[in-house]
Image (tube, helix red, strand yellow):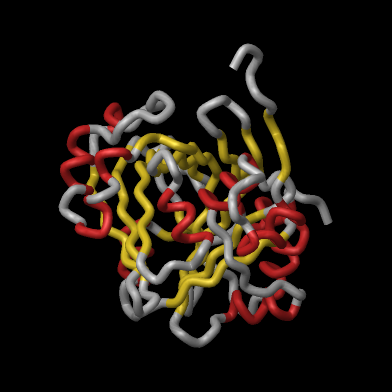
Amino acid sequence: MTAAAWEDIASGLEPVSLTALDAAASLQRRVDRKYLVTPELWAAVLRDLPESPRVLEMDGLRRFRYSSVYYDTPDLAAYRAAAHRRPRRFKVRTRRYVDTGGAAVEVKLRSRTGDTVKHRLWLPEDEVLDPAPRAALPARARQFVSAFPDVSDALPTLGATLTTTYDRTTLLTADARVTVDSHVTGTDQYGVAVGFTRTLIVETKSPSRAGDVDRALWRHGARPQKVSKYCTSLAALEPTLPSNRWSRTLRGHVSLVQPALAGA
């Protein structure tokens, strides 16, 4: 079975609109589970499902390019809070939907109870394009972020730290919303890039009980893993950072794809 087999399967699925996808996904409280799998294994999982999923289609496209810029303090407070599993932590990023033209700033907050809540403000796309290294948040994004007490102390020193890019395919089953991220790459301010070159990041969003996709993944030997595009990419780029939490992922899935640019 070739690496492209899962995309061949996706191309033959029935489409679902974004409106219908969002309506179905909002019907119940959901739990997120992430898996790191090869394209070949994911193709086998799709063939093993009891019912074929539908695939998000917009303007004739079924795979969409994403670009996210993460903002952190000079001492990487957001990264270190995640690495040390501190009960209260935050993540700030801008996200650009390359193919559909949308853009937003997002604040993800984790409470002491372990719940993660994402807050989003839509922005004009030209406000989030390719910031300079350590650049501050765009003015409108900065104002939005300032409203969150957990981030306000760090806000004055937040700067662009890492850019991640990837392609996303979104599936809808009877009991879950599933995203499949491929060609995941993280690039630092010096142009050095690392990536999940032979790995897909599959995330299921389902009720507290496992869904059909989770059970199919388990049958094929895949288990949920702790994965953060920002943290694992930054840990691979900066080996001196604390990274025990993601050591298994770093060993098995992340590798250098672009060395430093000449003269950087």
Q: Does 1 sit above or below residue 214?
A: above
Give the percent coordinates (x, y) of residue 123: 24, 39
Near-viewer residue (78 or 210): 78
In this rendered view, identify the residue nearer to me: 173 or 75. Answer: 75
Q: Residue at x 52, y 69 (%)?
A: 204
Where residue 243 sits, quadrant-wise, is bottom right
Q: Position of residue 82 (x, y in %)?
A: 48, 60
Answer with left or right where residue 204 lies relative to residue 74: right
Q: From where the camera sits, is residue 244 visible?
A: yes
**Coordinates of residue 19 in the picture (x, y in percent):** 31, 60
- As displayed, is residue 215 above or below residue 125? below
Residue furthest to the top in view is 263
Viewport quadrant of the N terminus: bottom right
- Residue displayed at 57% across by 40% down: 186
The residue sitting at 37% across, 45% down in the picture is 93
Q: How many marks?
A: 0
Q: Quadrant of the C terminus?
A: top right
Q: Do we see residue 20 in this rendering? A: no
Residue at image x 49%, y 44%? 64
**Residue 150 appears left or right of 169:** left
- Pick whichever, 108 or 172, lies toward us: 108
